[in-house]
Image: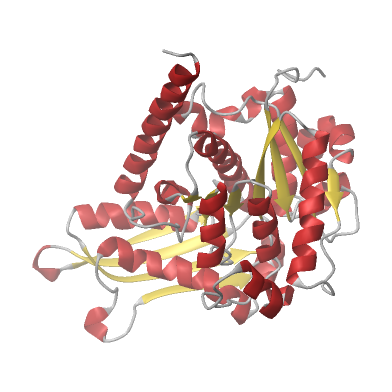
Amino acid sequence: MTASNLSNSESLLLMIAGAKGAVGSTVAVASAAMRYQPELVLPSLTTKQMLPGLDPSEPVQVAGWDATDTTLPSAIGAQGVLSEEIWKPYADELEQVQVRTPPSDSLDLKGQVQQLTQDIKEFRGLYPNARAVLINLLPATVTENLHRFKSLSQLYSEFDPINLPDLAYAIAAILAGVPVVNFTPNEVEIPVVIDEAVKRGVPLSGRDGKTGQTYLKVVLASALKARNLFVDGWYSLNILGNQDGKNLMDPKRAAGKLSNKTEILNEILGYPVGERYGASSHQVKIDYYPPRGDAKEAWDVIDFLGLFGLPMSIRLNLQGRDSILATPLVLDLARWMVVLQRAGRSGPIPELAFYYKQPLGDDAPVTFQDQLSRLRQLATGLREEISRQKAVRSGR
């Protein structure tokens, strides 16, 4: 098998926190496929149409961190997301992927940041011509309010990262000038981190990737709002049997994700669903069901009112594949971040709300129509800015 465009001077380096999980290992396989058979992956990416000529060259390299004591190919097999005929052709390369042990829990936040900063430096040394992006795929954690911290030094001295390991990865990446994609519901984009990112010219993207049920919820809610159909209630059930589903059985860990999946509906519609009952009639539940594995299933019951207040309803059943839905979004977001950094953007990027349940930044678009429109406007603006930069460099 011959790699495509491996001689290009610039490629993309994904540094993944949680590299051997279901999504991380699927991203690794897709990245290998992009080096050899890009036609298998590129058609699934929105950036292929929106950023032609601007996105990084097709070769994508992977490195990262994971606590699992097994090889990456073994992890891919154990996750059961992909059949062997899909990933086995890349087994030798996947075996060579650098996946390191995360910082020890015994280290304080500063010590963890220092270790991760060194890892990032060494990863970049392996691929000196690559543009690096940090991808956070760590499990959902207990919600922490870190807005009280006013400086990195205060964070270092007062915060115990045991319940939020994600924070060390985000800080280390920003200090190294590496853009951050936070695909998890864990809030690392606190004011002190955002300030540091802006100061160092680092774009931030997040929070909580919008892959299946919530993506369709945004589409349907936007459509109902556009027709002035009043949403009277919305019941959502998710069943999935992967490690993400098991982790979310802890109510404290699930709180952030459930909040993101719930709040988004009121924001789109402009009113609280269930207000006429005096309590929310928008319910979201997540159940761990091992037989489903990564093939999650989502059920939605939507009750709405039309002319004369007459009731109607929609039933929606999504039988999706969690990691297969997530992986193209991760690759898309990494490509966006590289172009954004080249164009001089830093801090939260609200125009990327299309990809997230809880988008970062001021004035992030809410409805599906607005999110798609802002994404297209972002692509146009980036193209114009990079063309301007080229003209300046060429002296025109």
Q: Residue at x 62, y 77 (%)?
A: 142
- Can the viewer see residue 207 in this picture? no
Find residue 111 and report its horizontal and vertical position in percent. Answer: 80, 66
- Can the viewer see residue 362 in this picture? yes
Find residue 382 and report its horizontal and vertical position in percent. Answer: 43, 32
* Above or below 82: residue 150: below
Find residue 158 and report its horizontal and vertical position in percent. Answer: 67, 80
Dividing the image into 4 quarters, which one contains the N terminus? top right
Residue lying furthest left: 308
Q: Does residue 9 appear to the left or right of 392 in the view shown? A: right
Q: Nearer the viewer, residue 111 or 220?
A: 111
Q: Residue at x 83, y 43 (%)?
A: 122
* Above or below 27: residue 19: below
Which quadrant of the structure image shows residue 279? bottom left
* Above or below 345: residue 45: above
Which quadrant of the structure image shows residue 182? bottom right
Q: Nearer the viewer, residue 13 or 260?
A: 13
Residue lying furthest front: 395
Dividing the image into 4 quarters, which one contains the C terminus? top left
Q: Residue at x 62, y 31 (%)?
A: 41
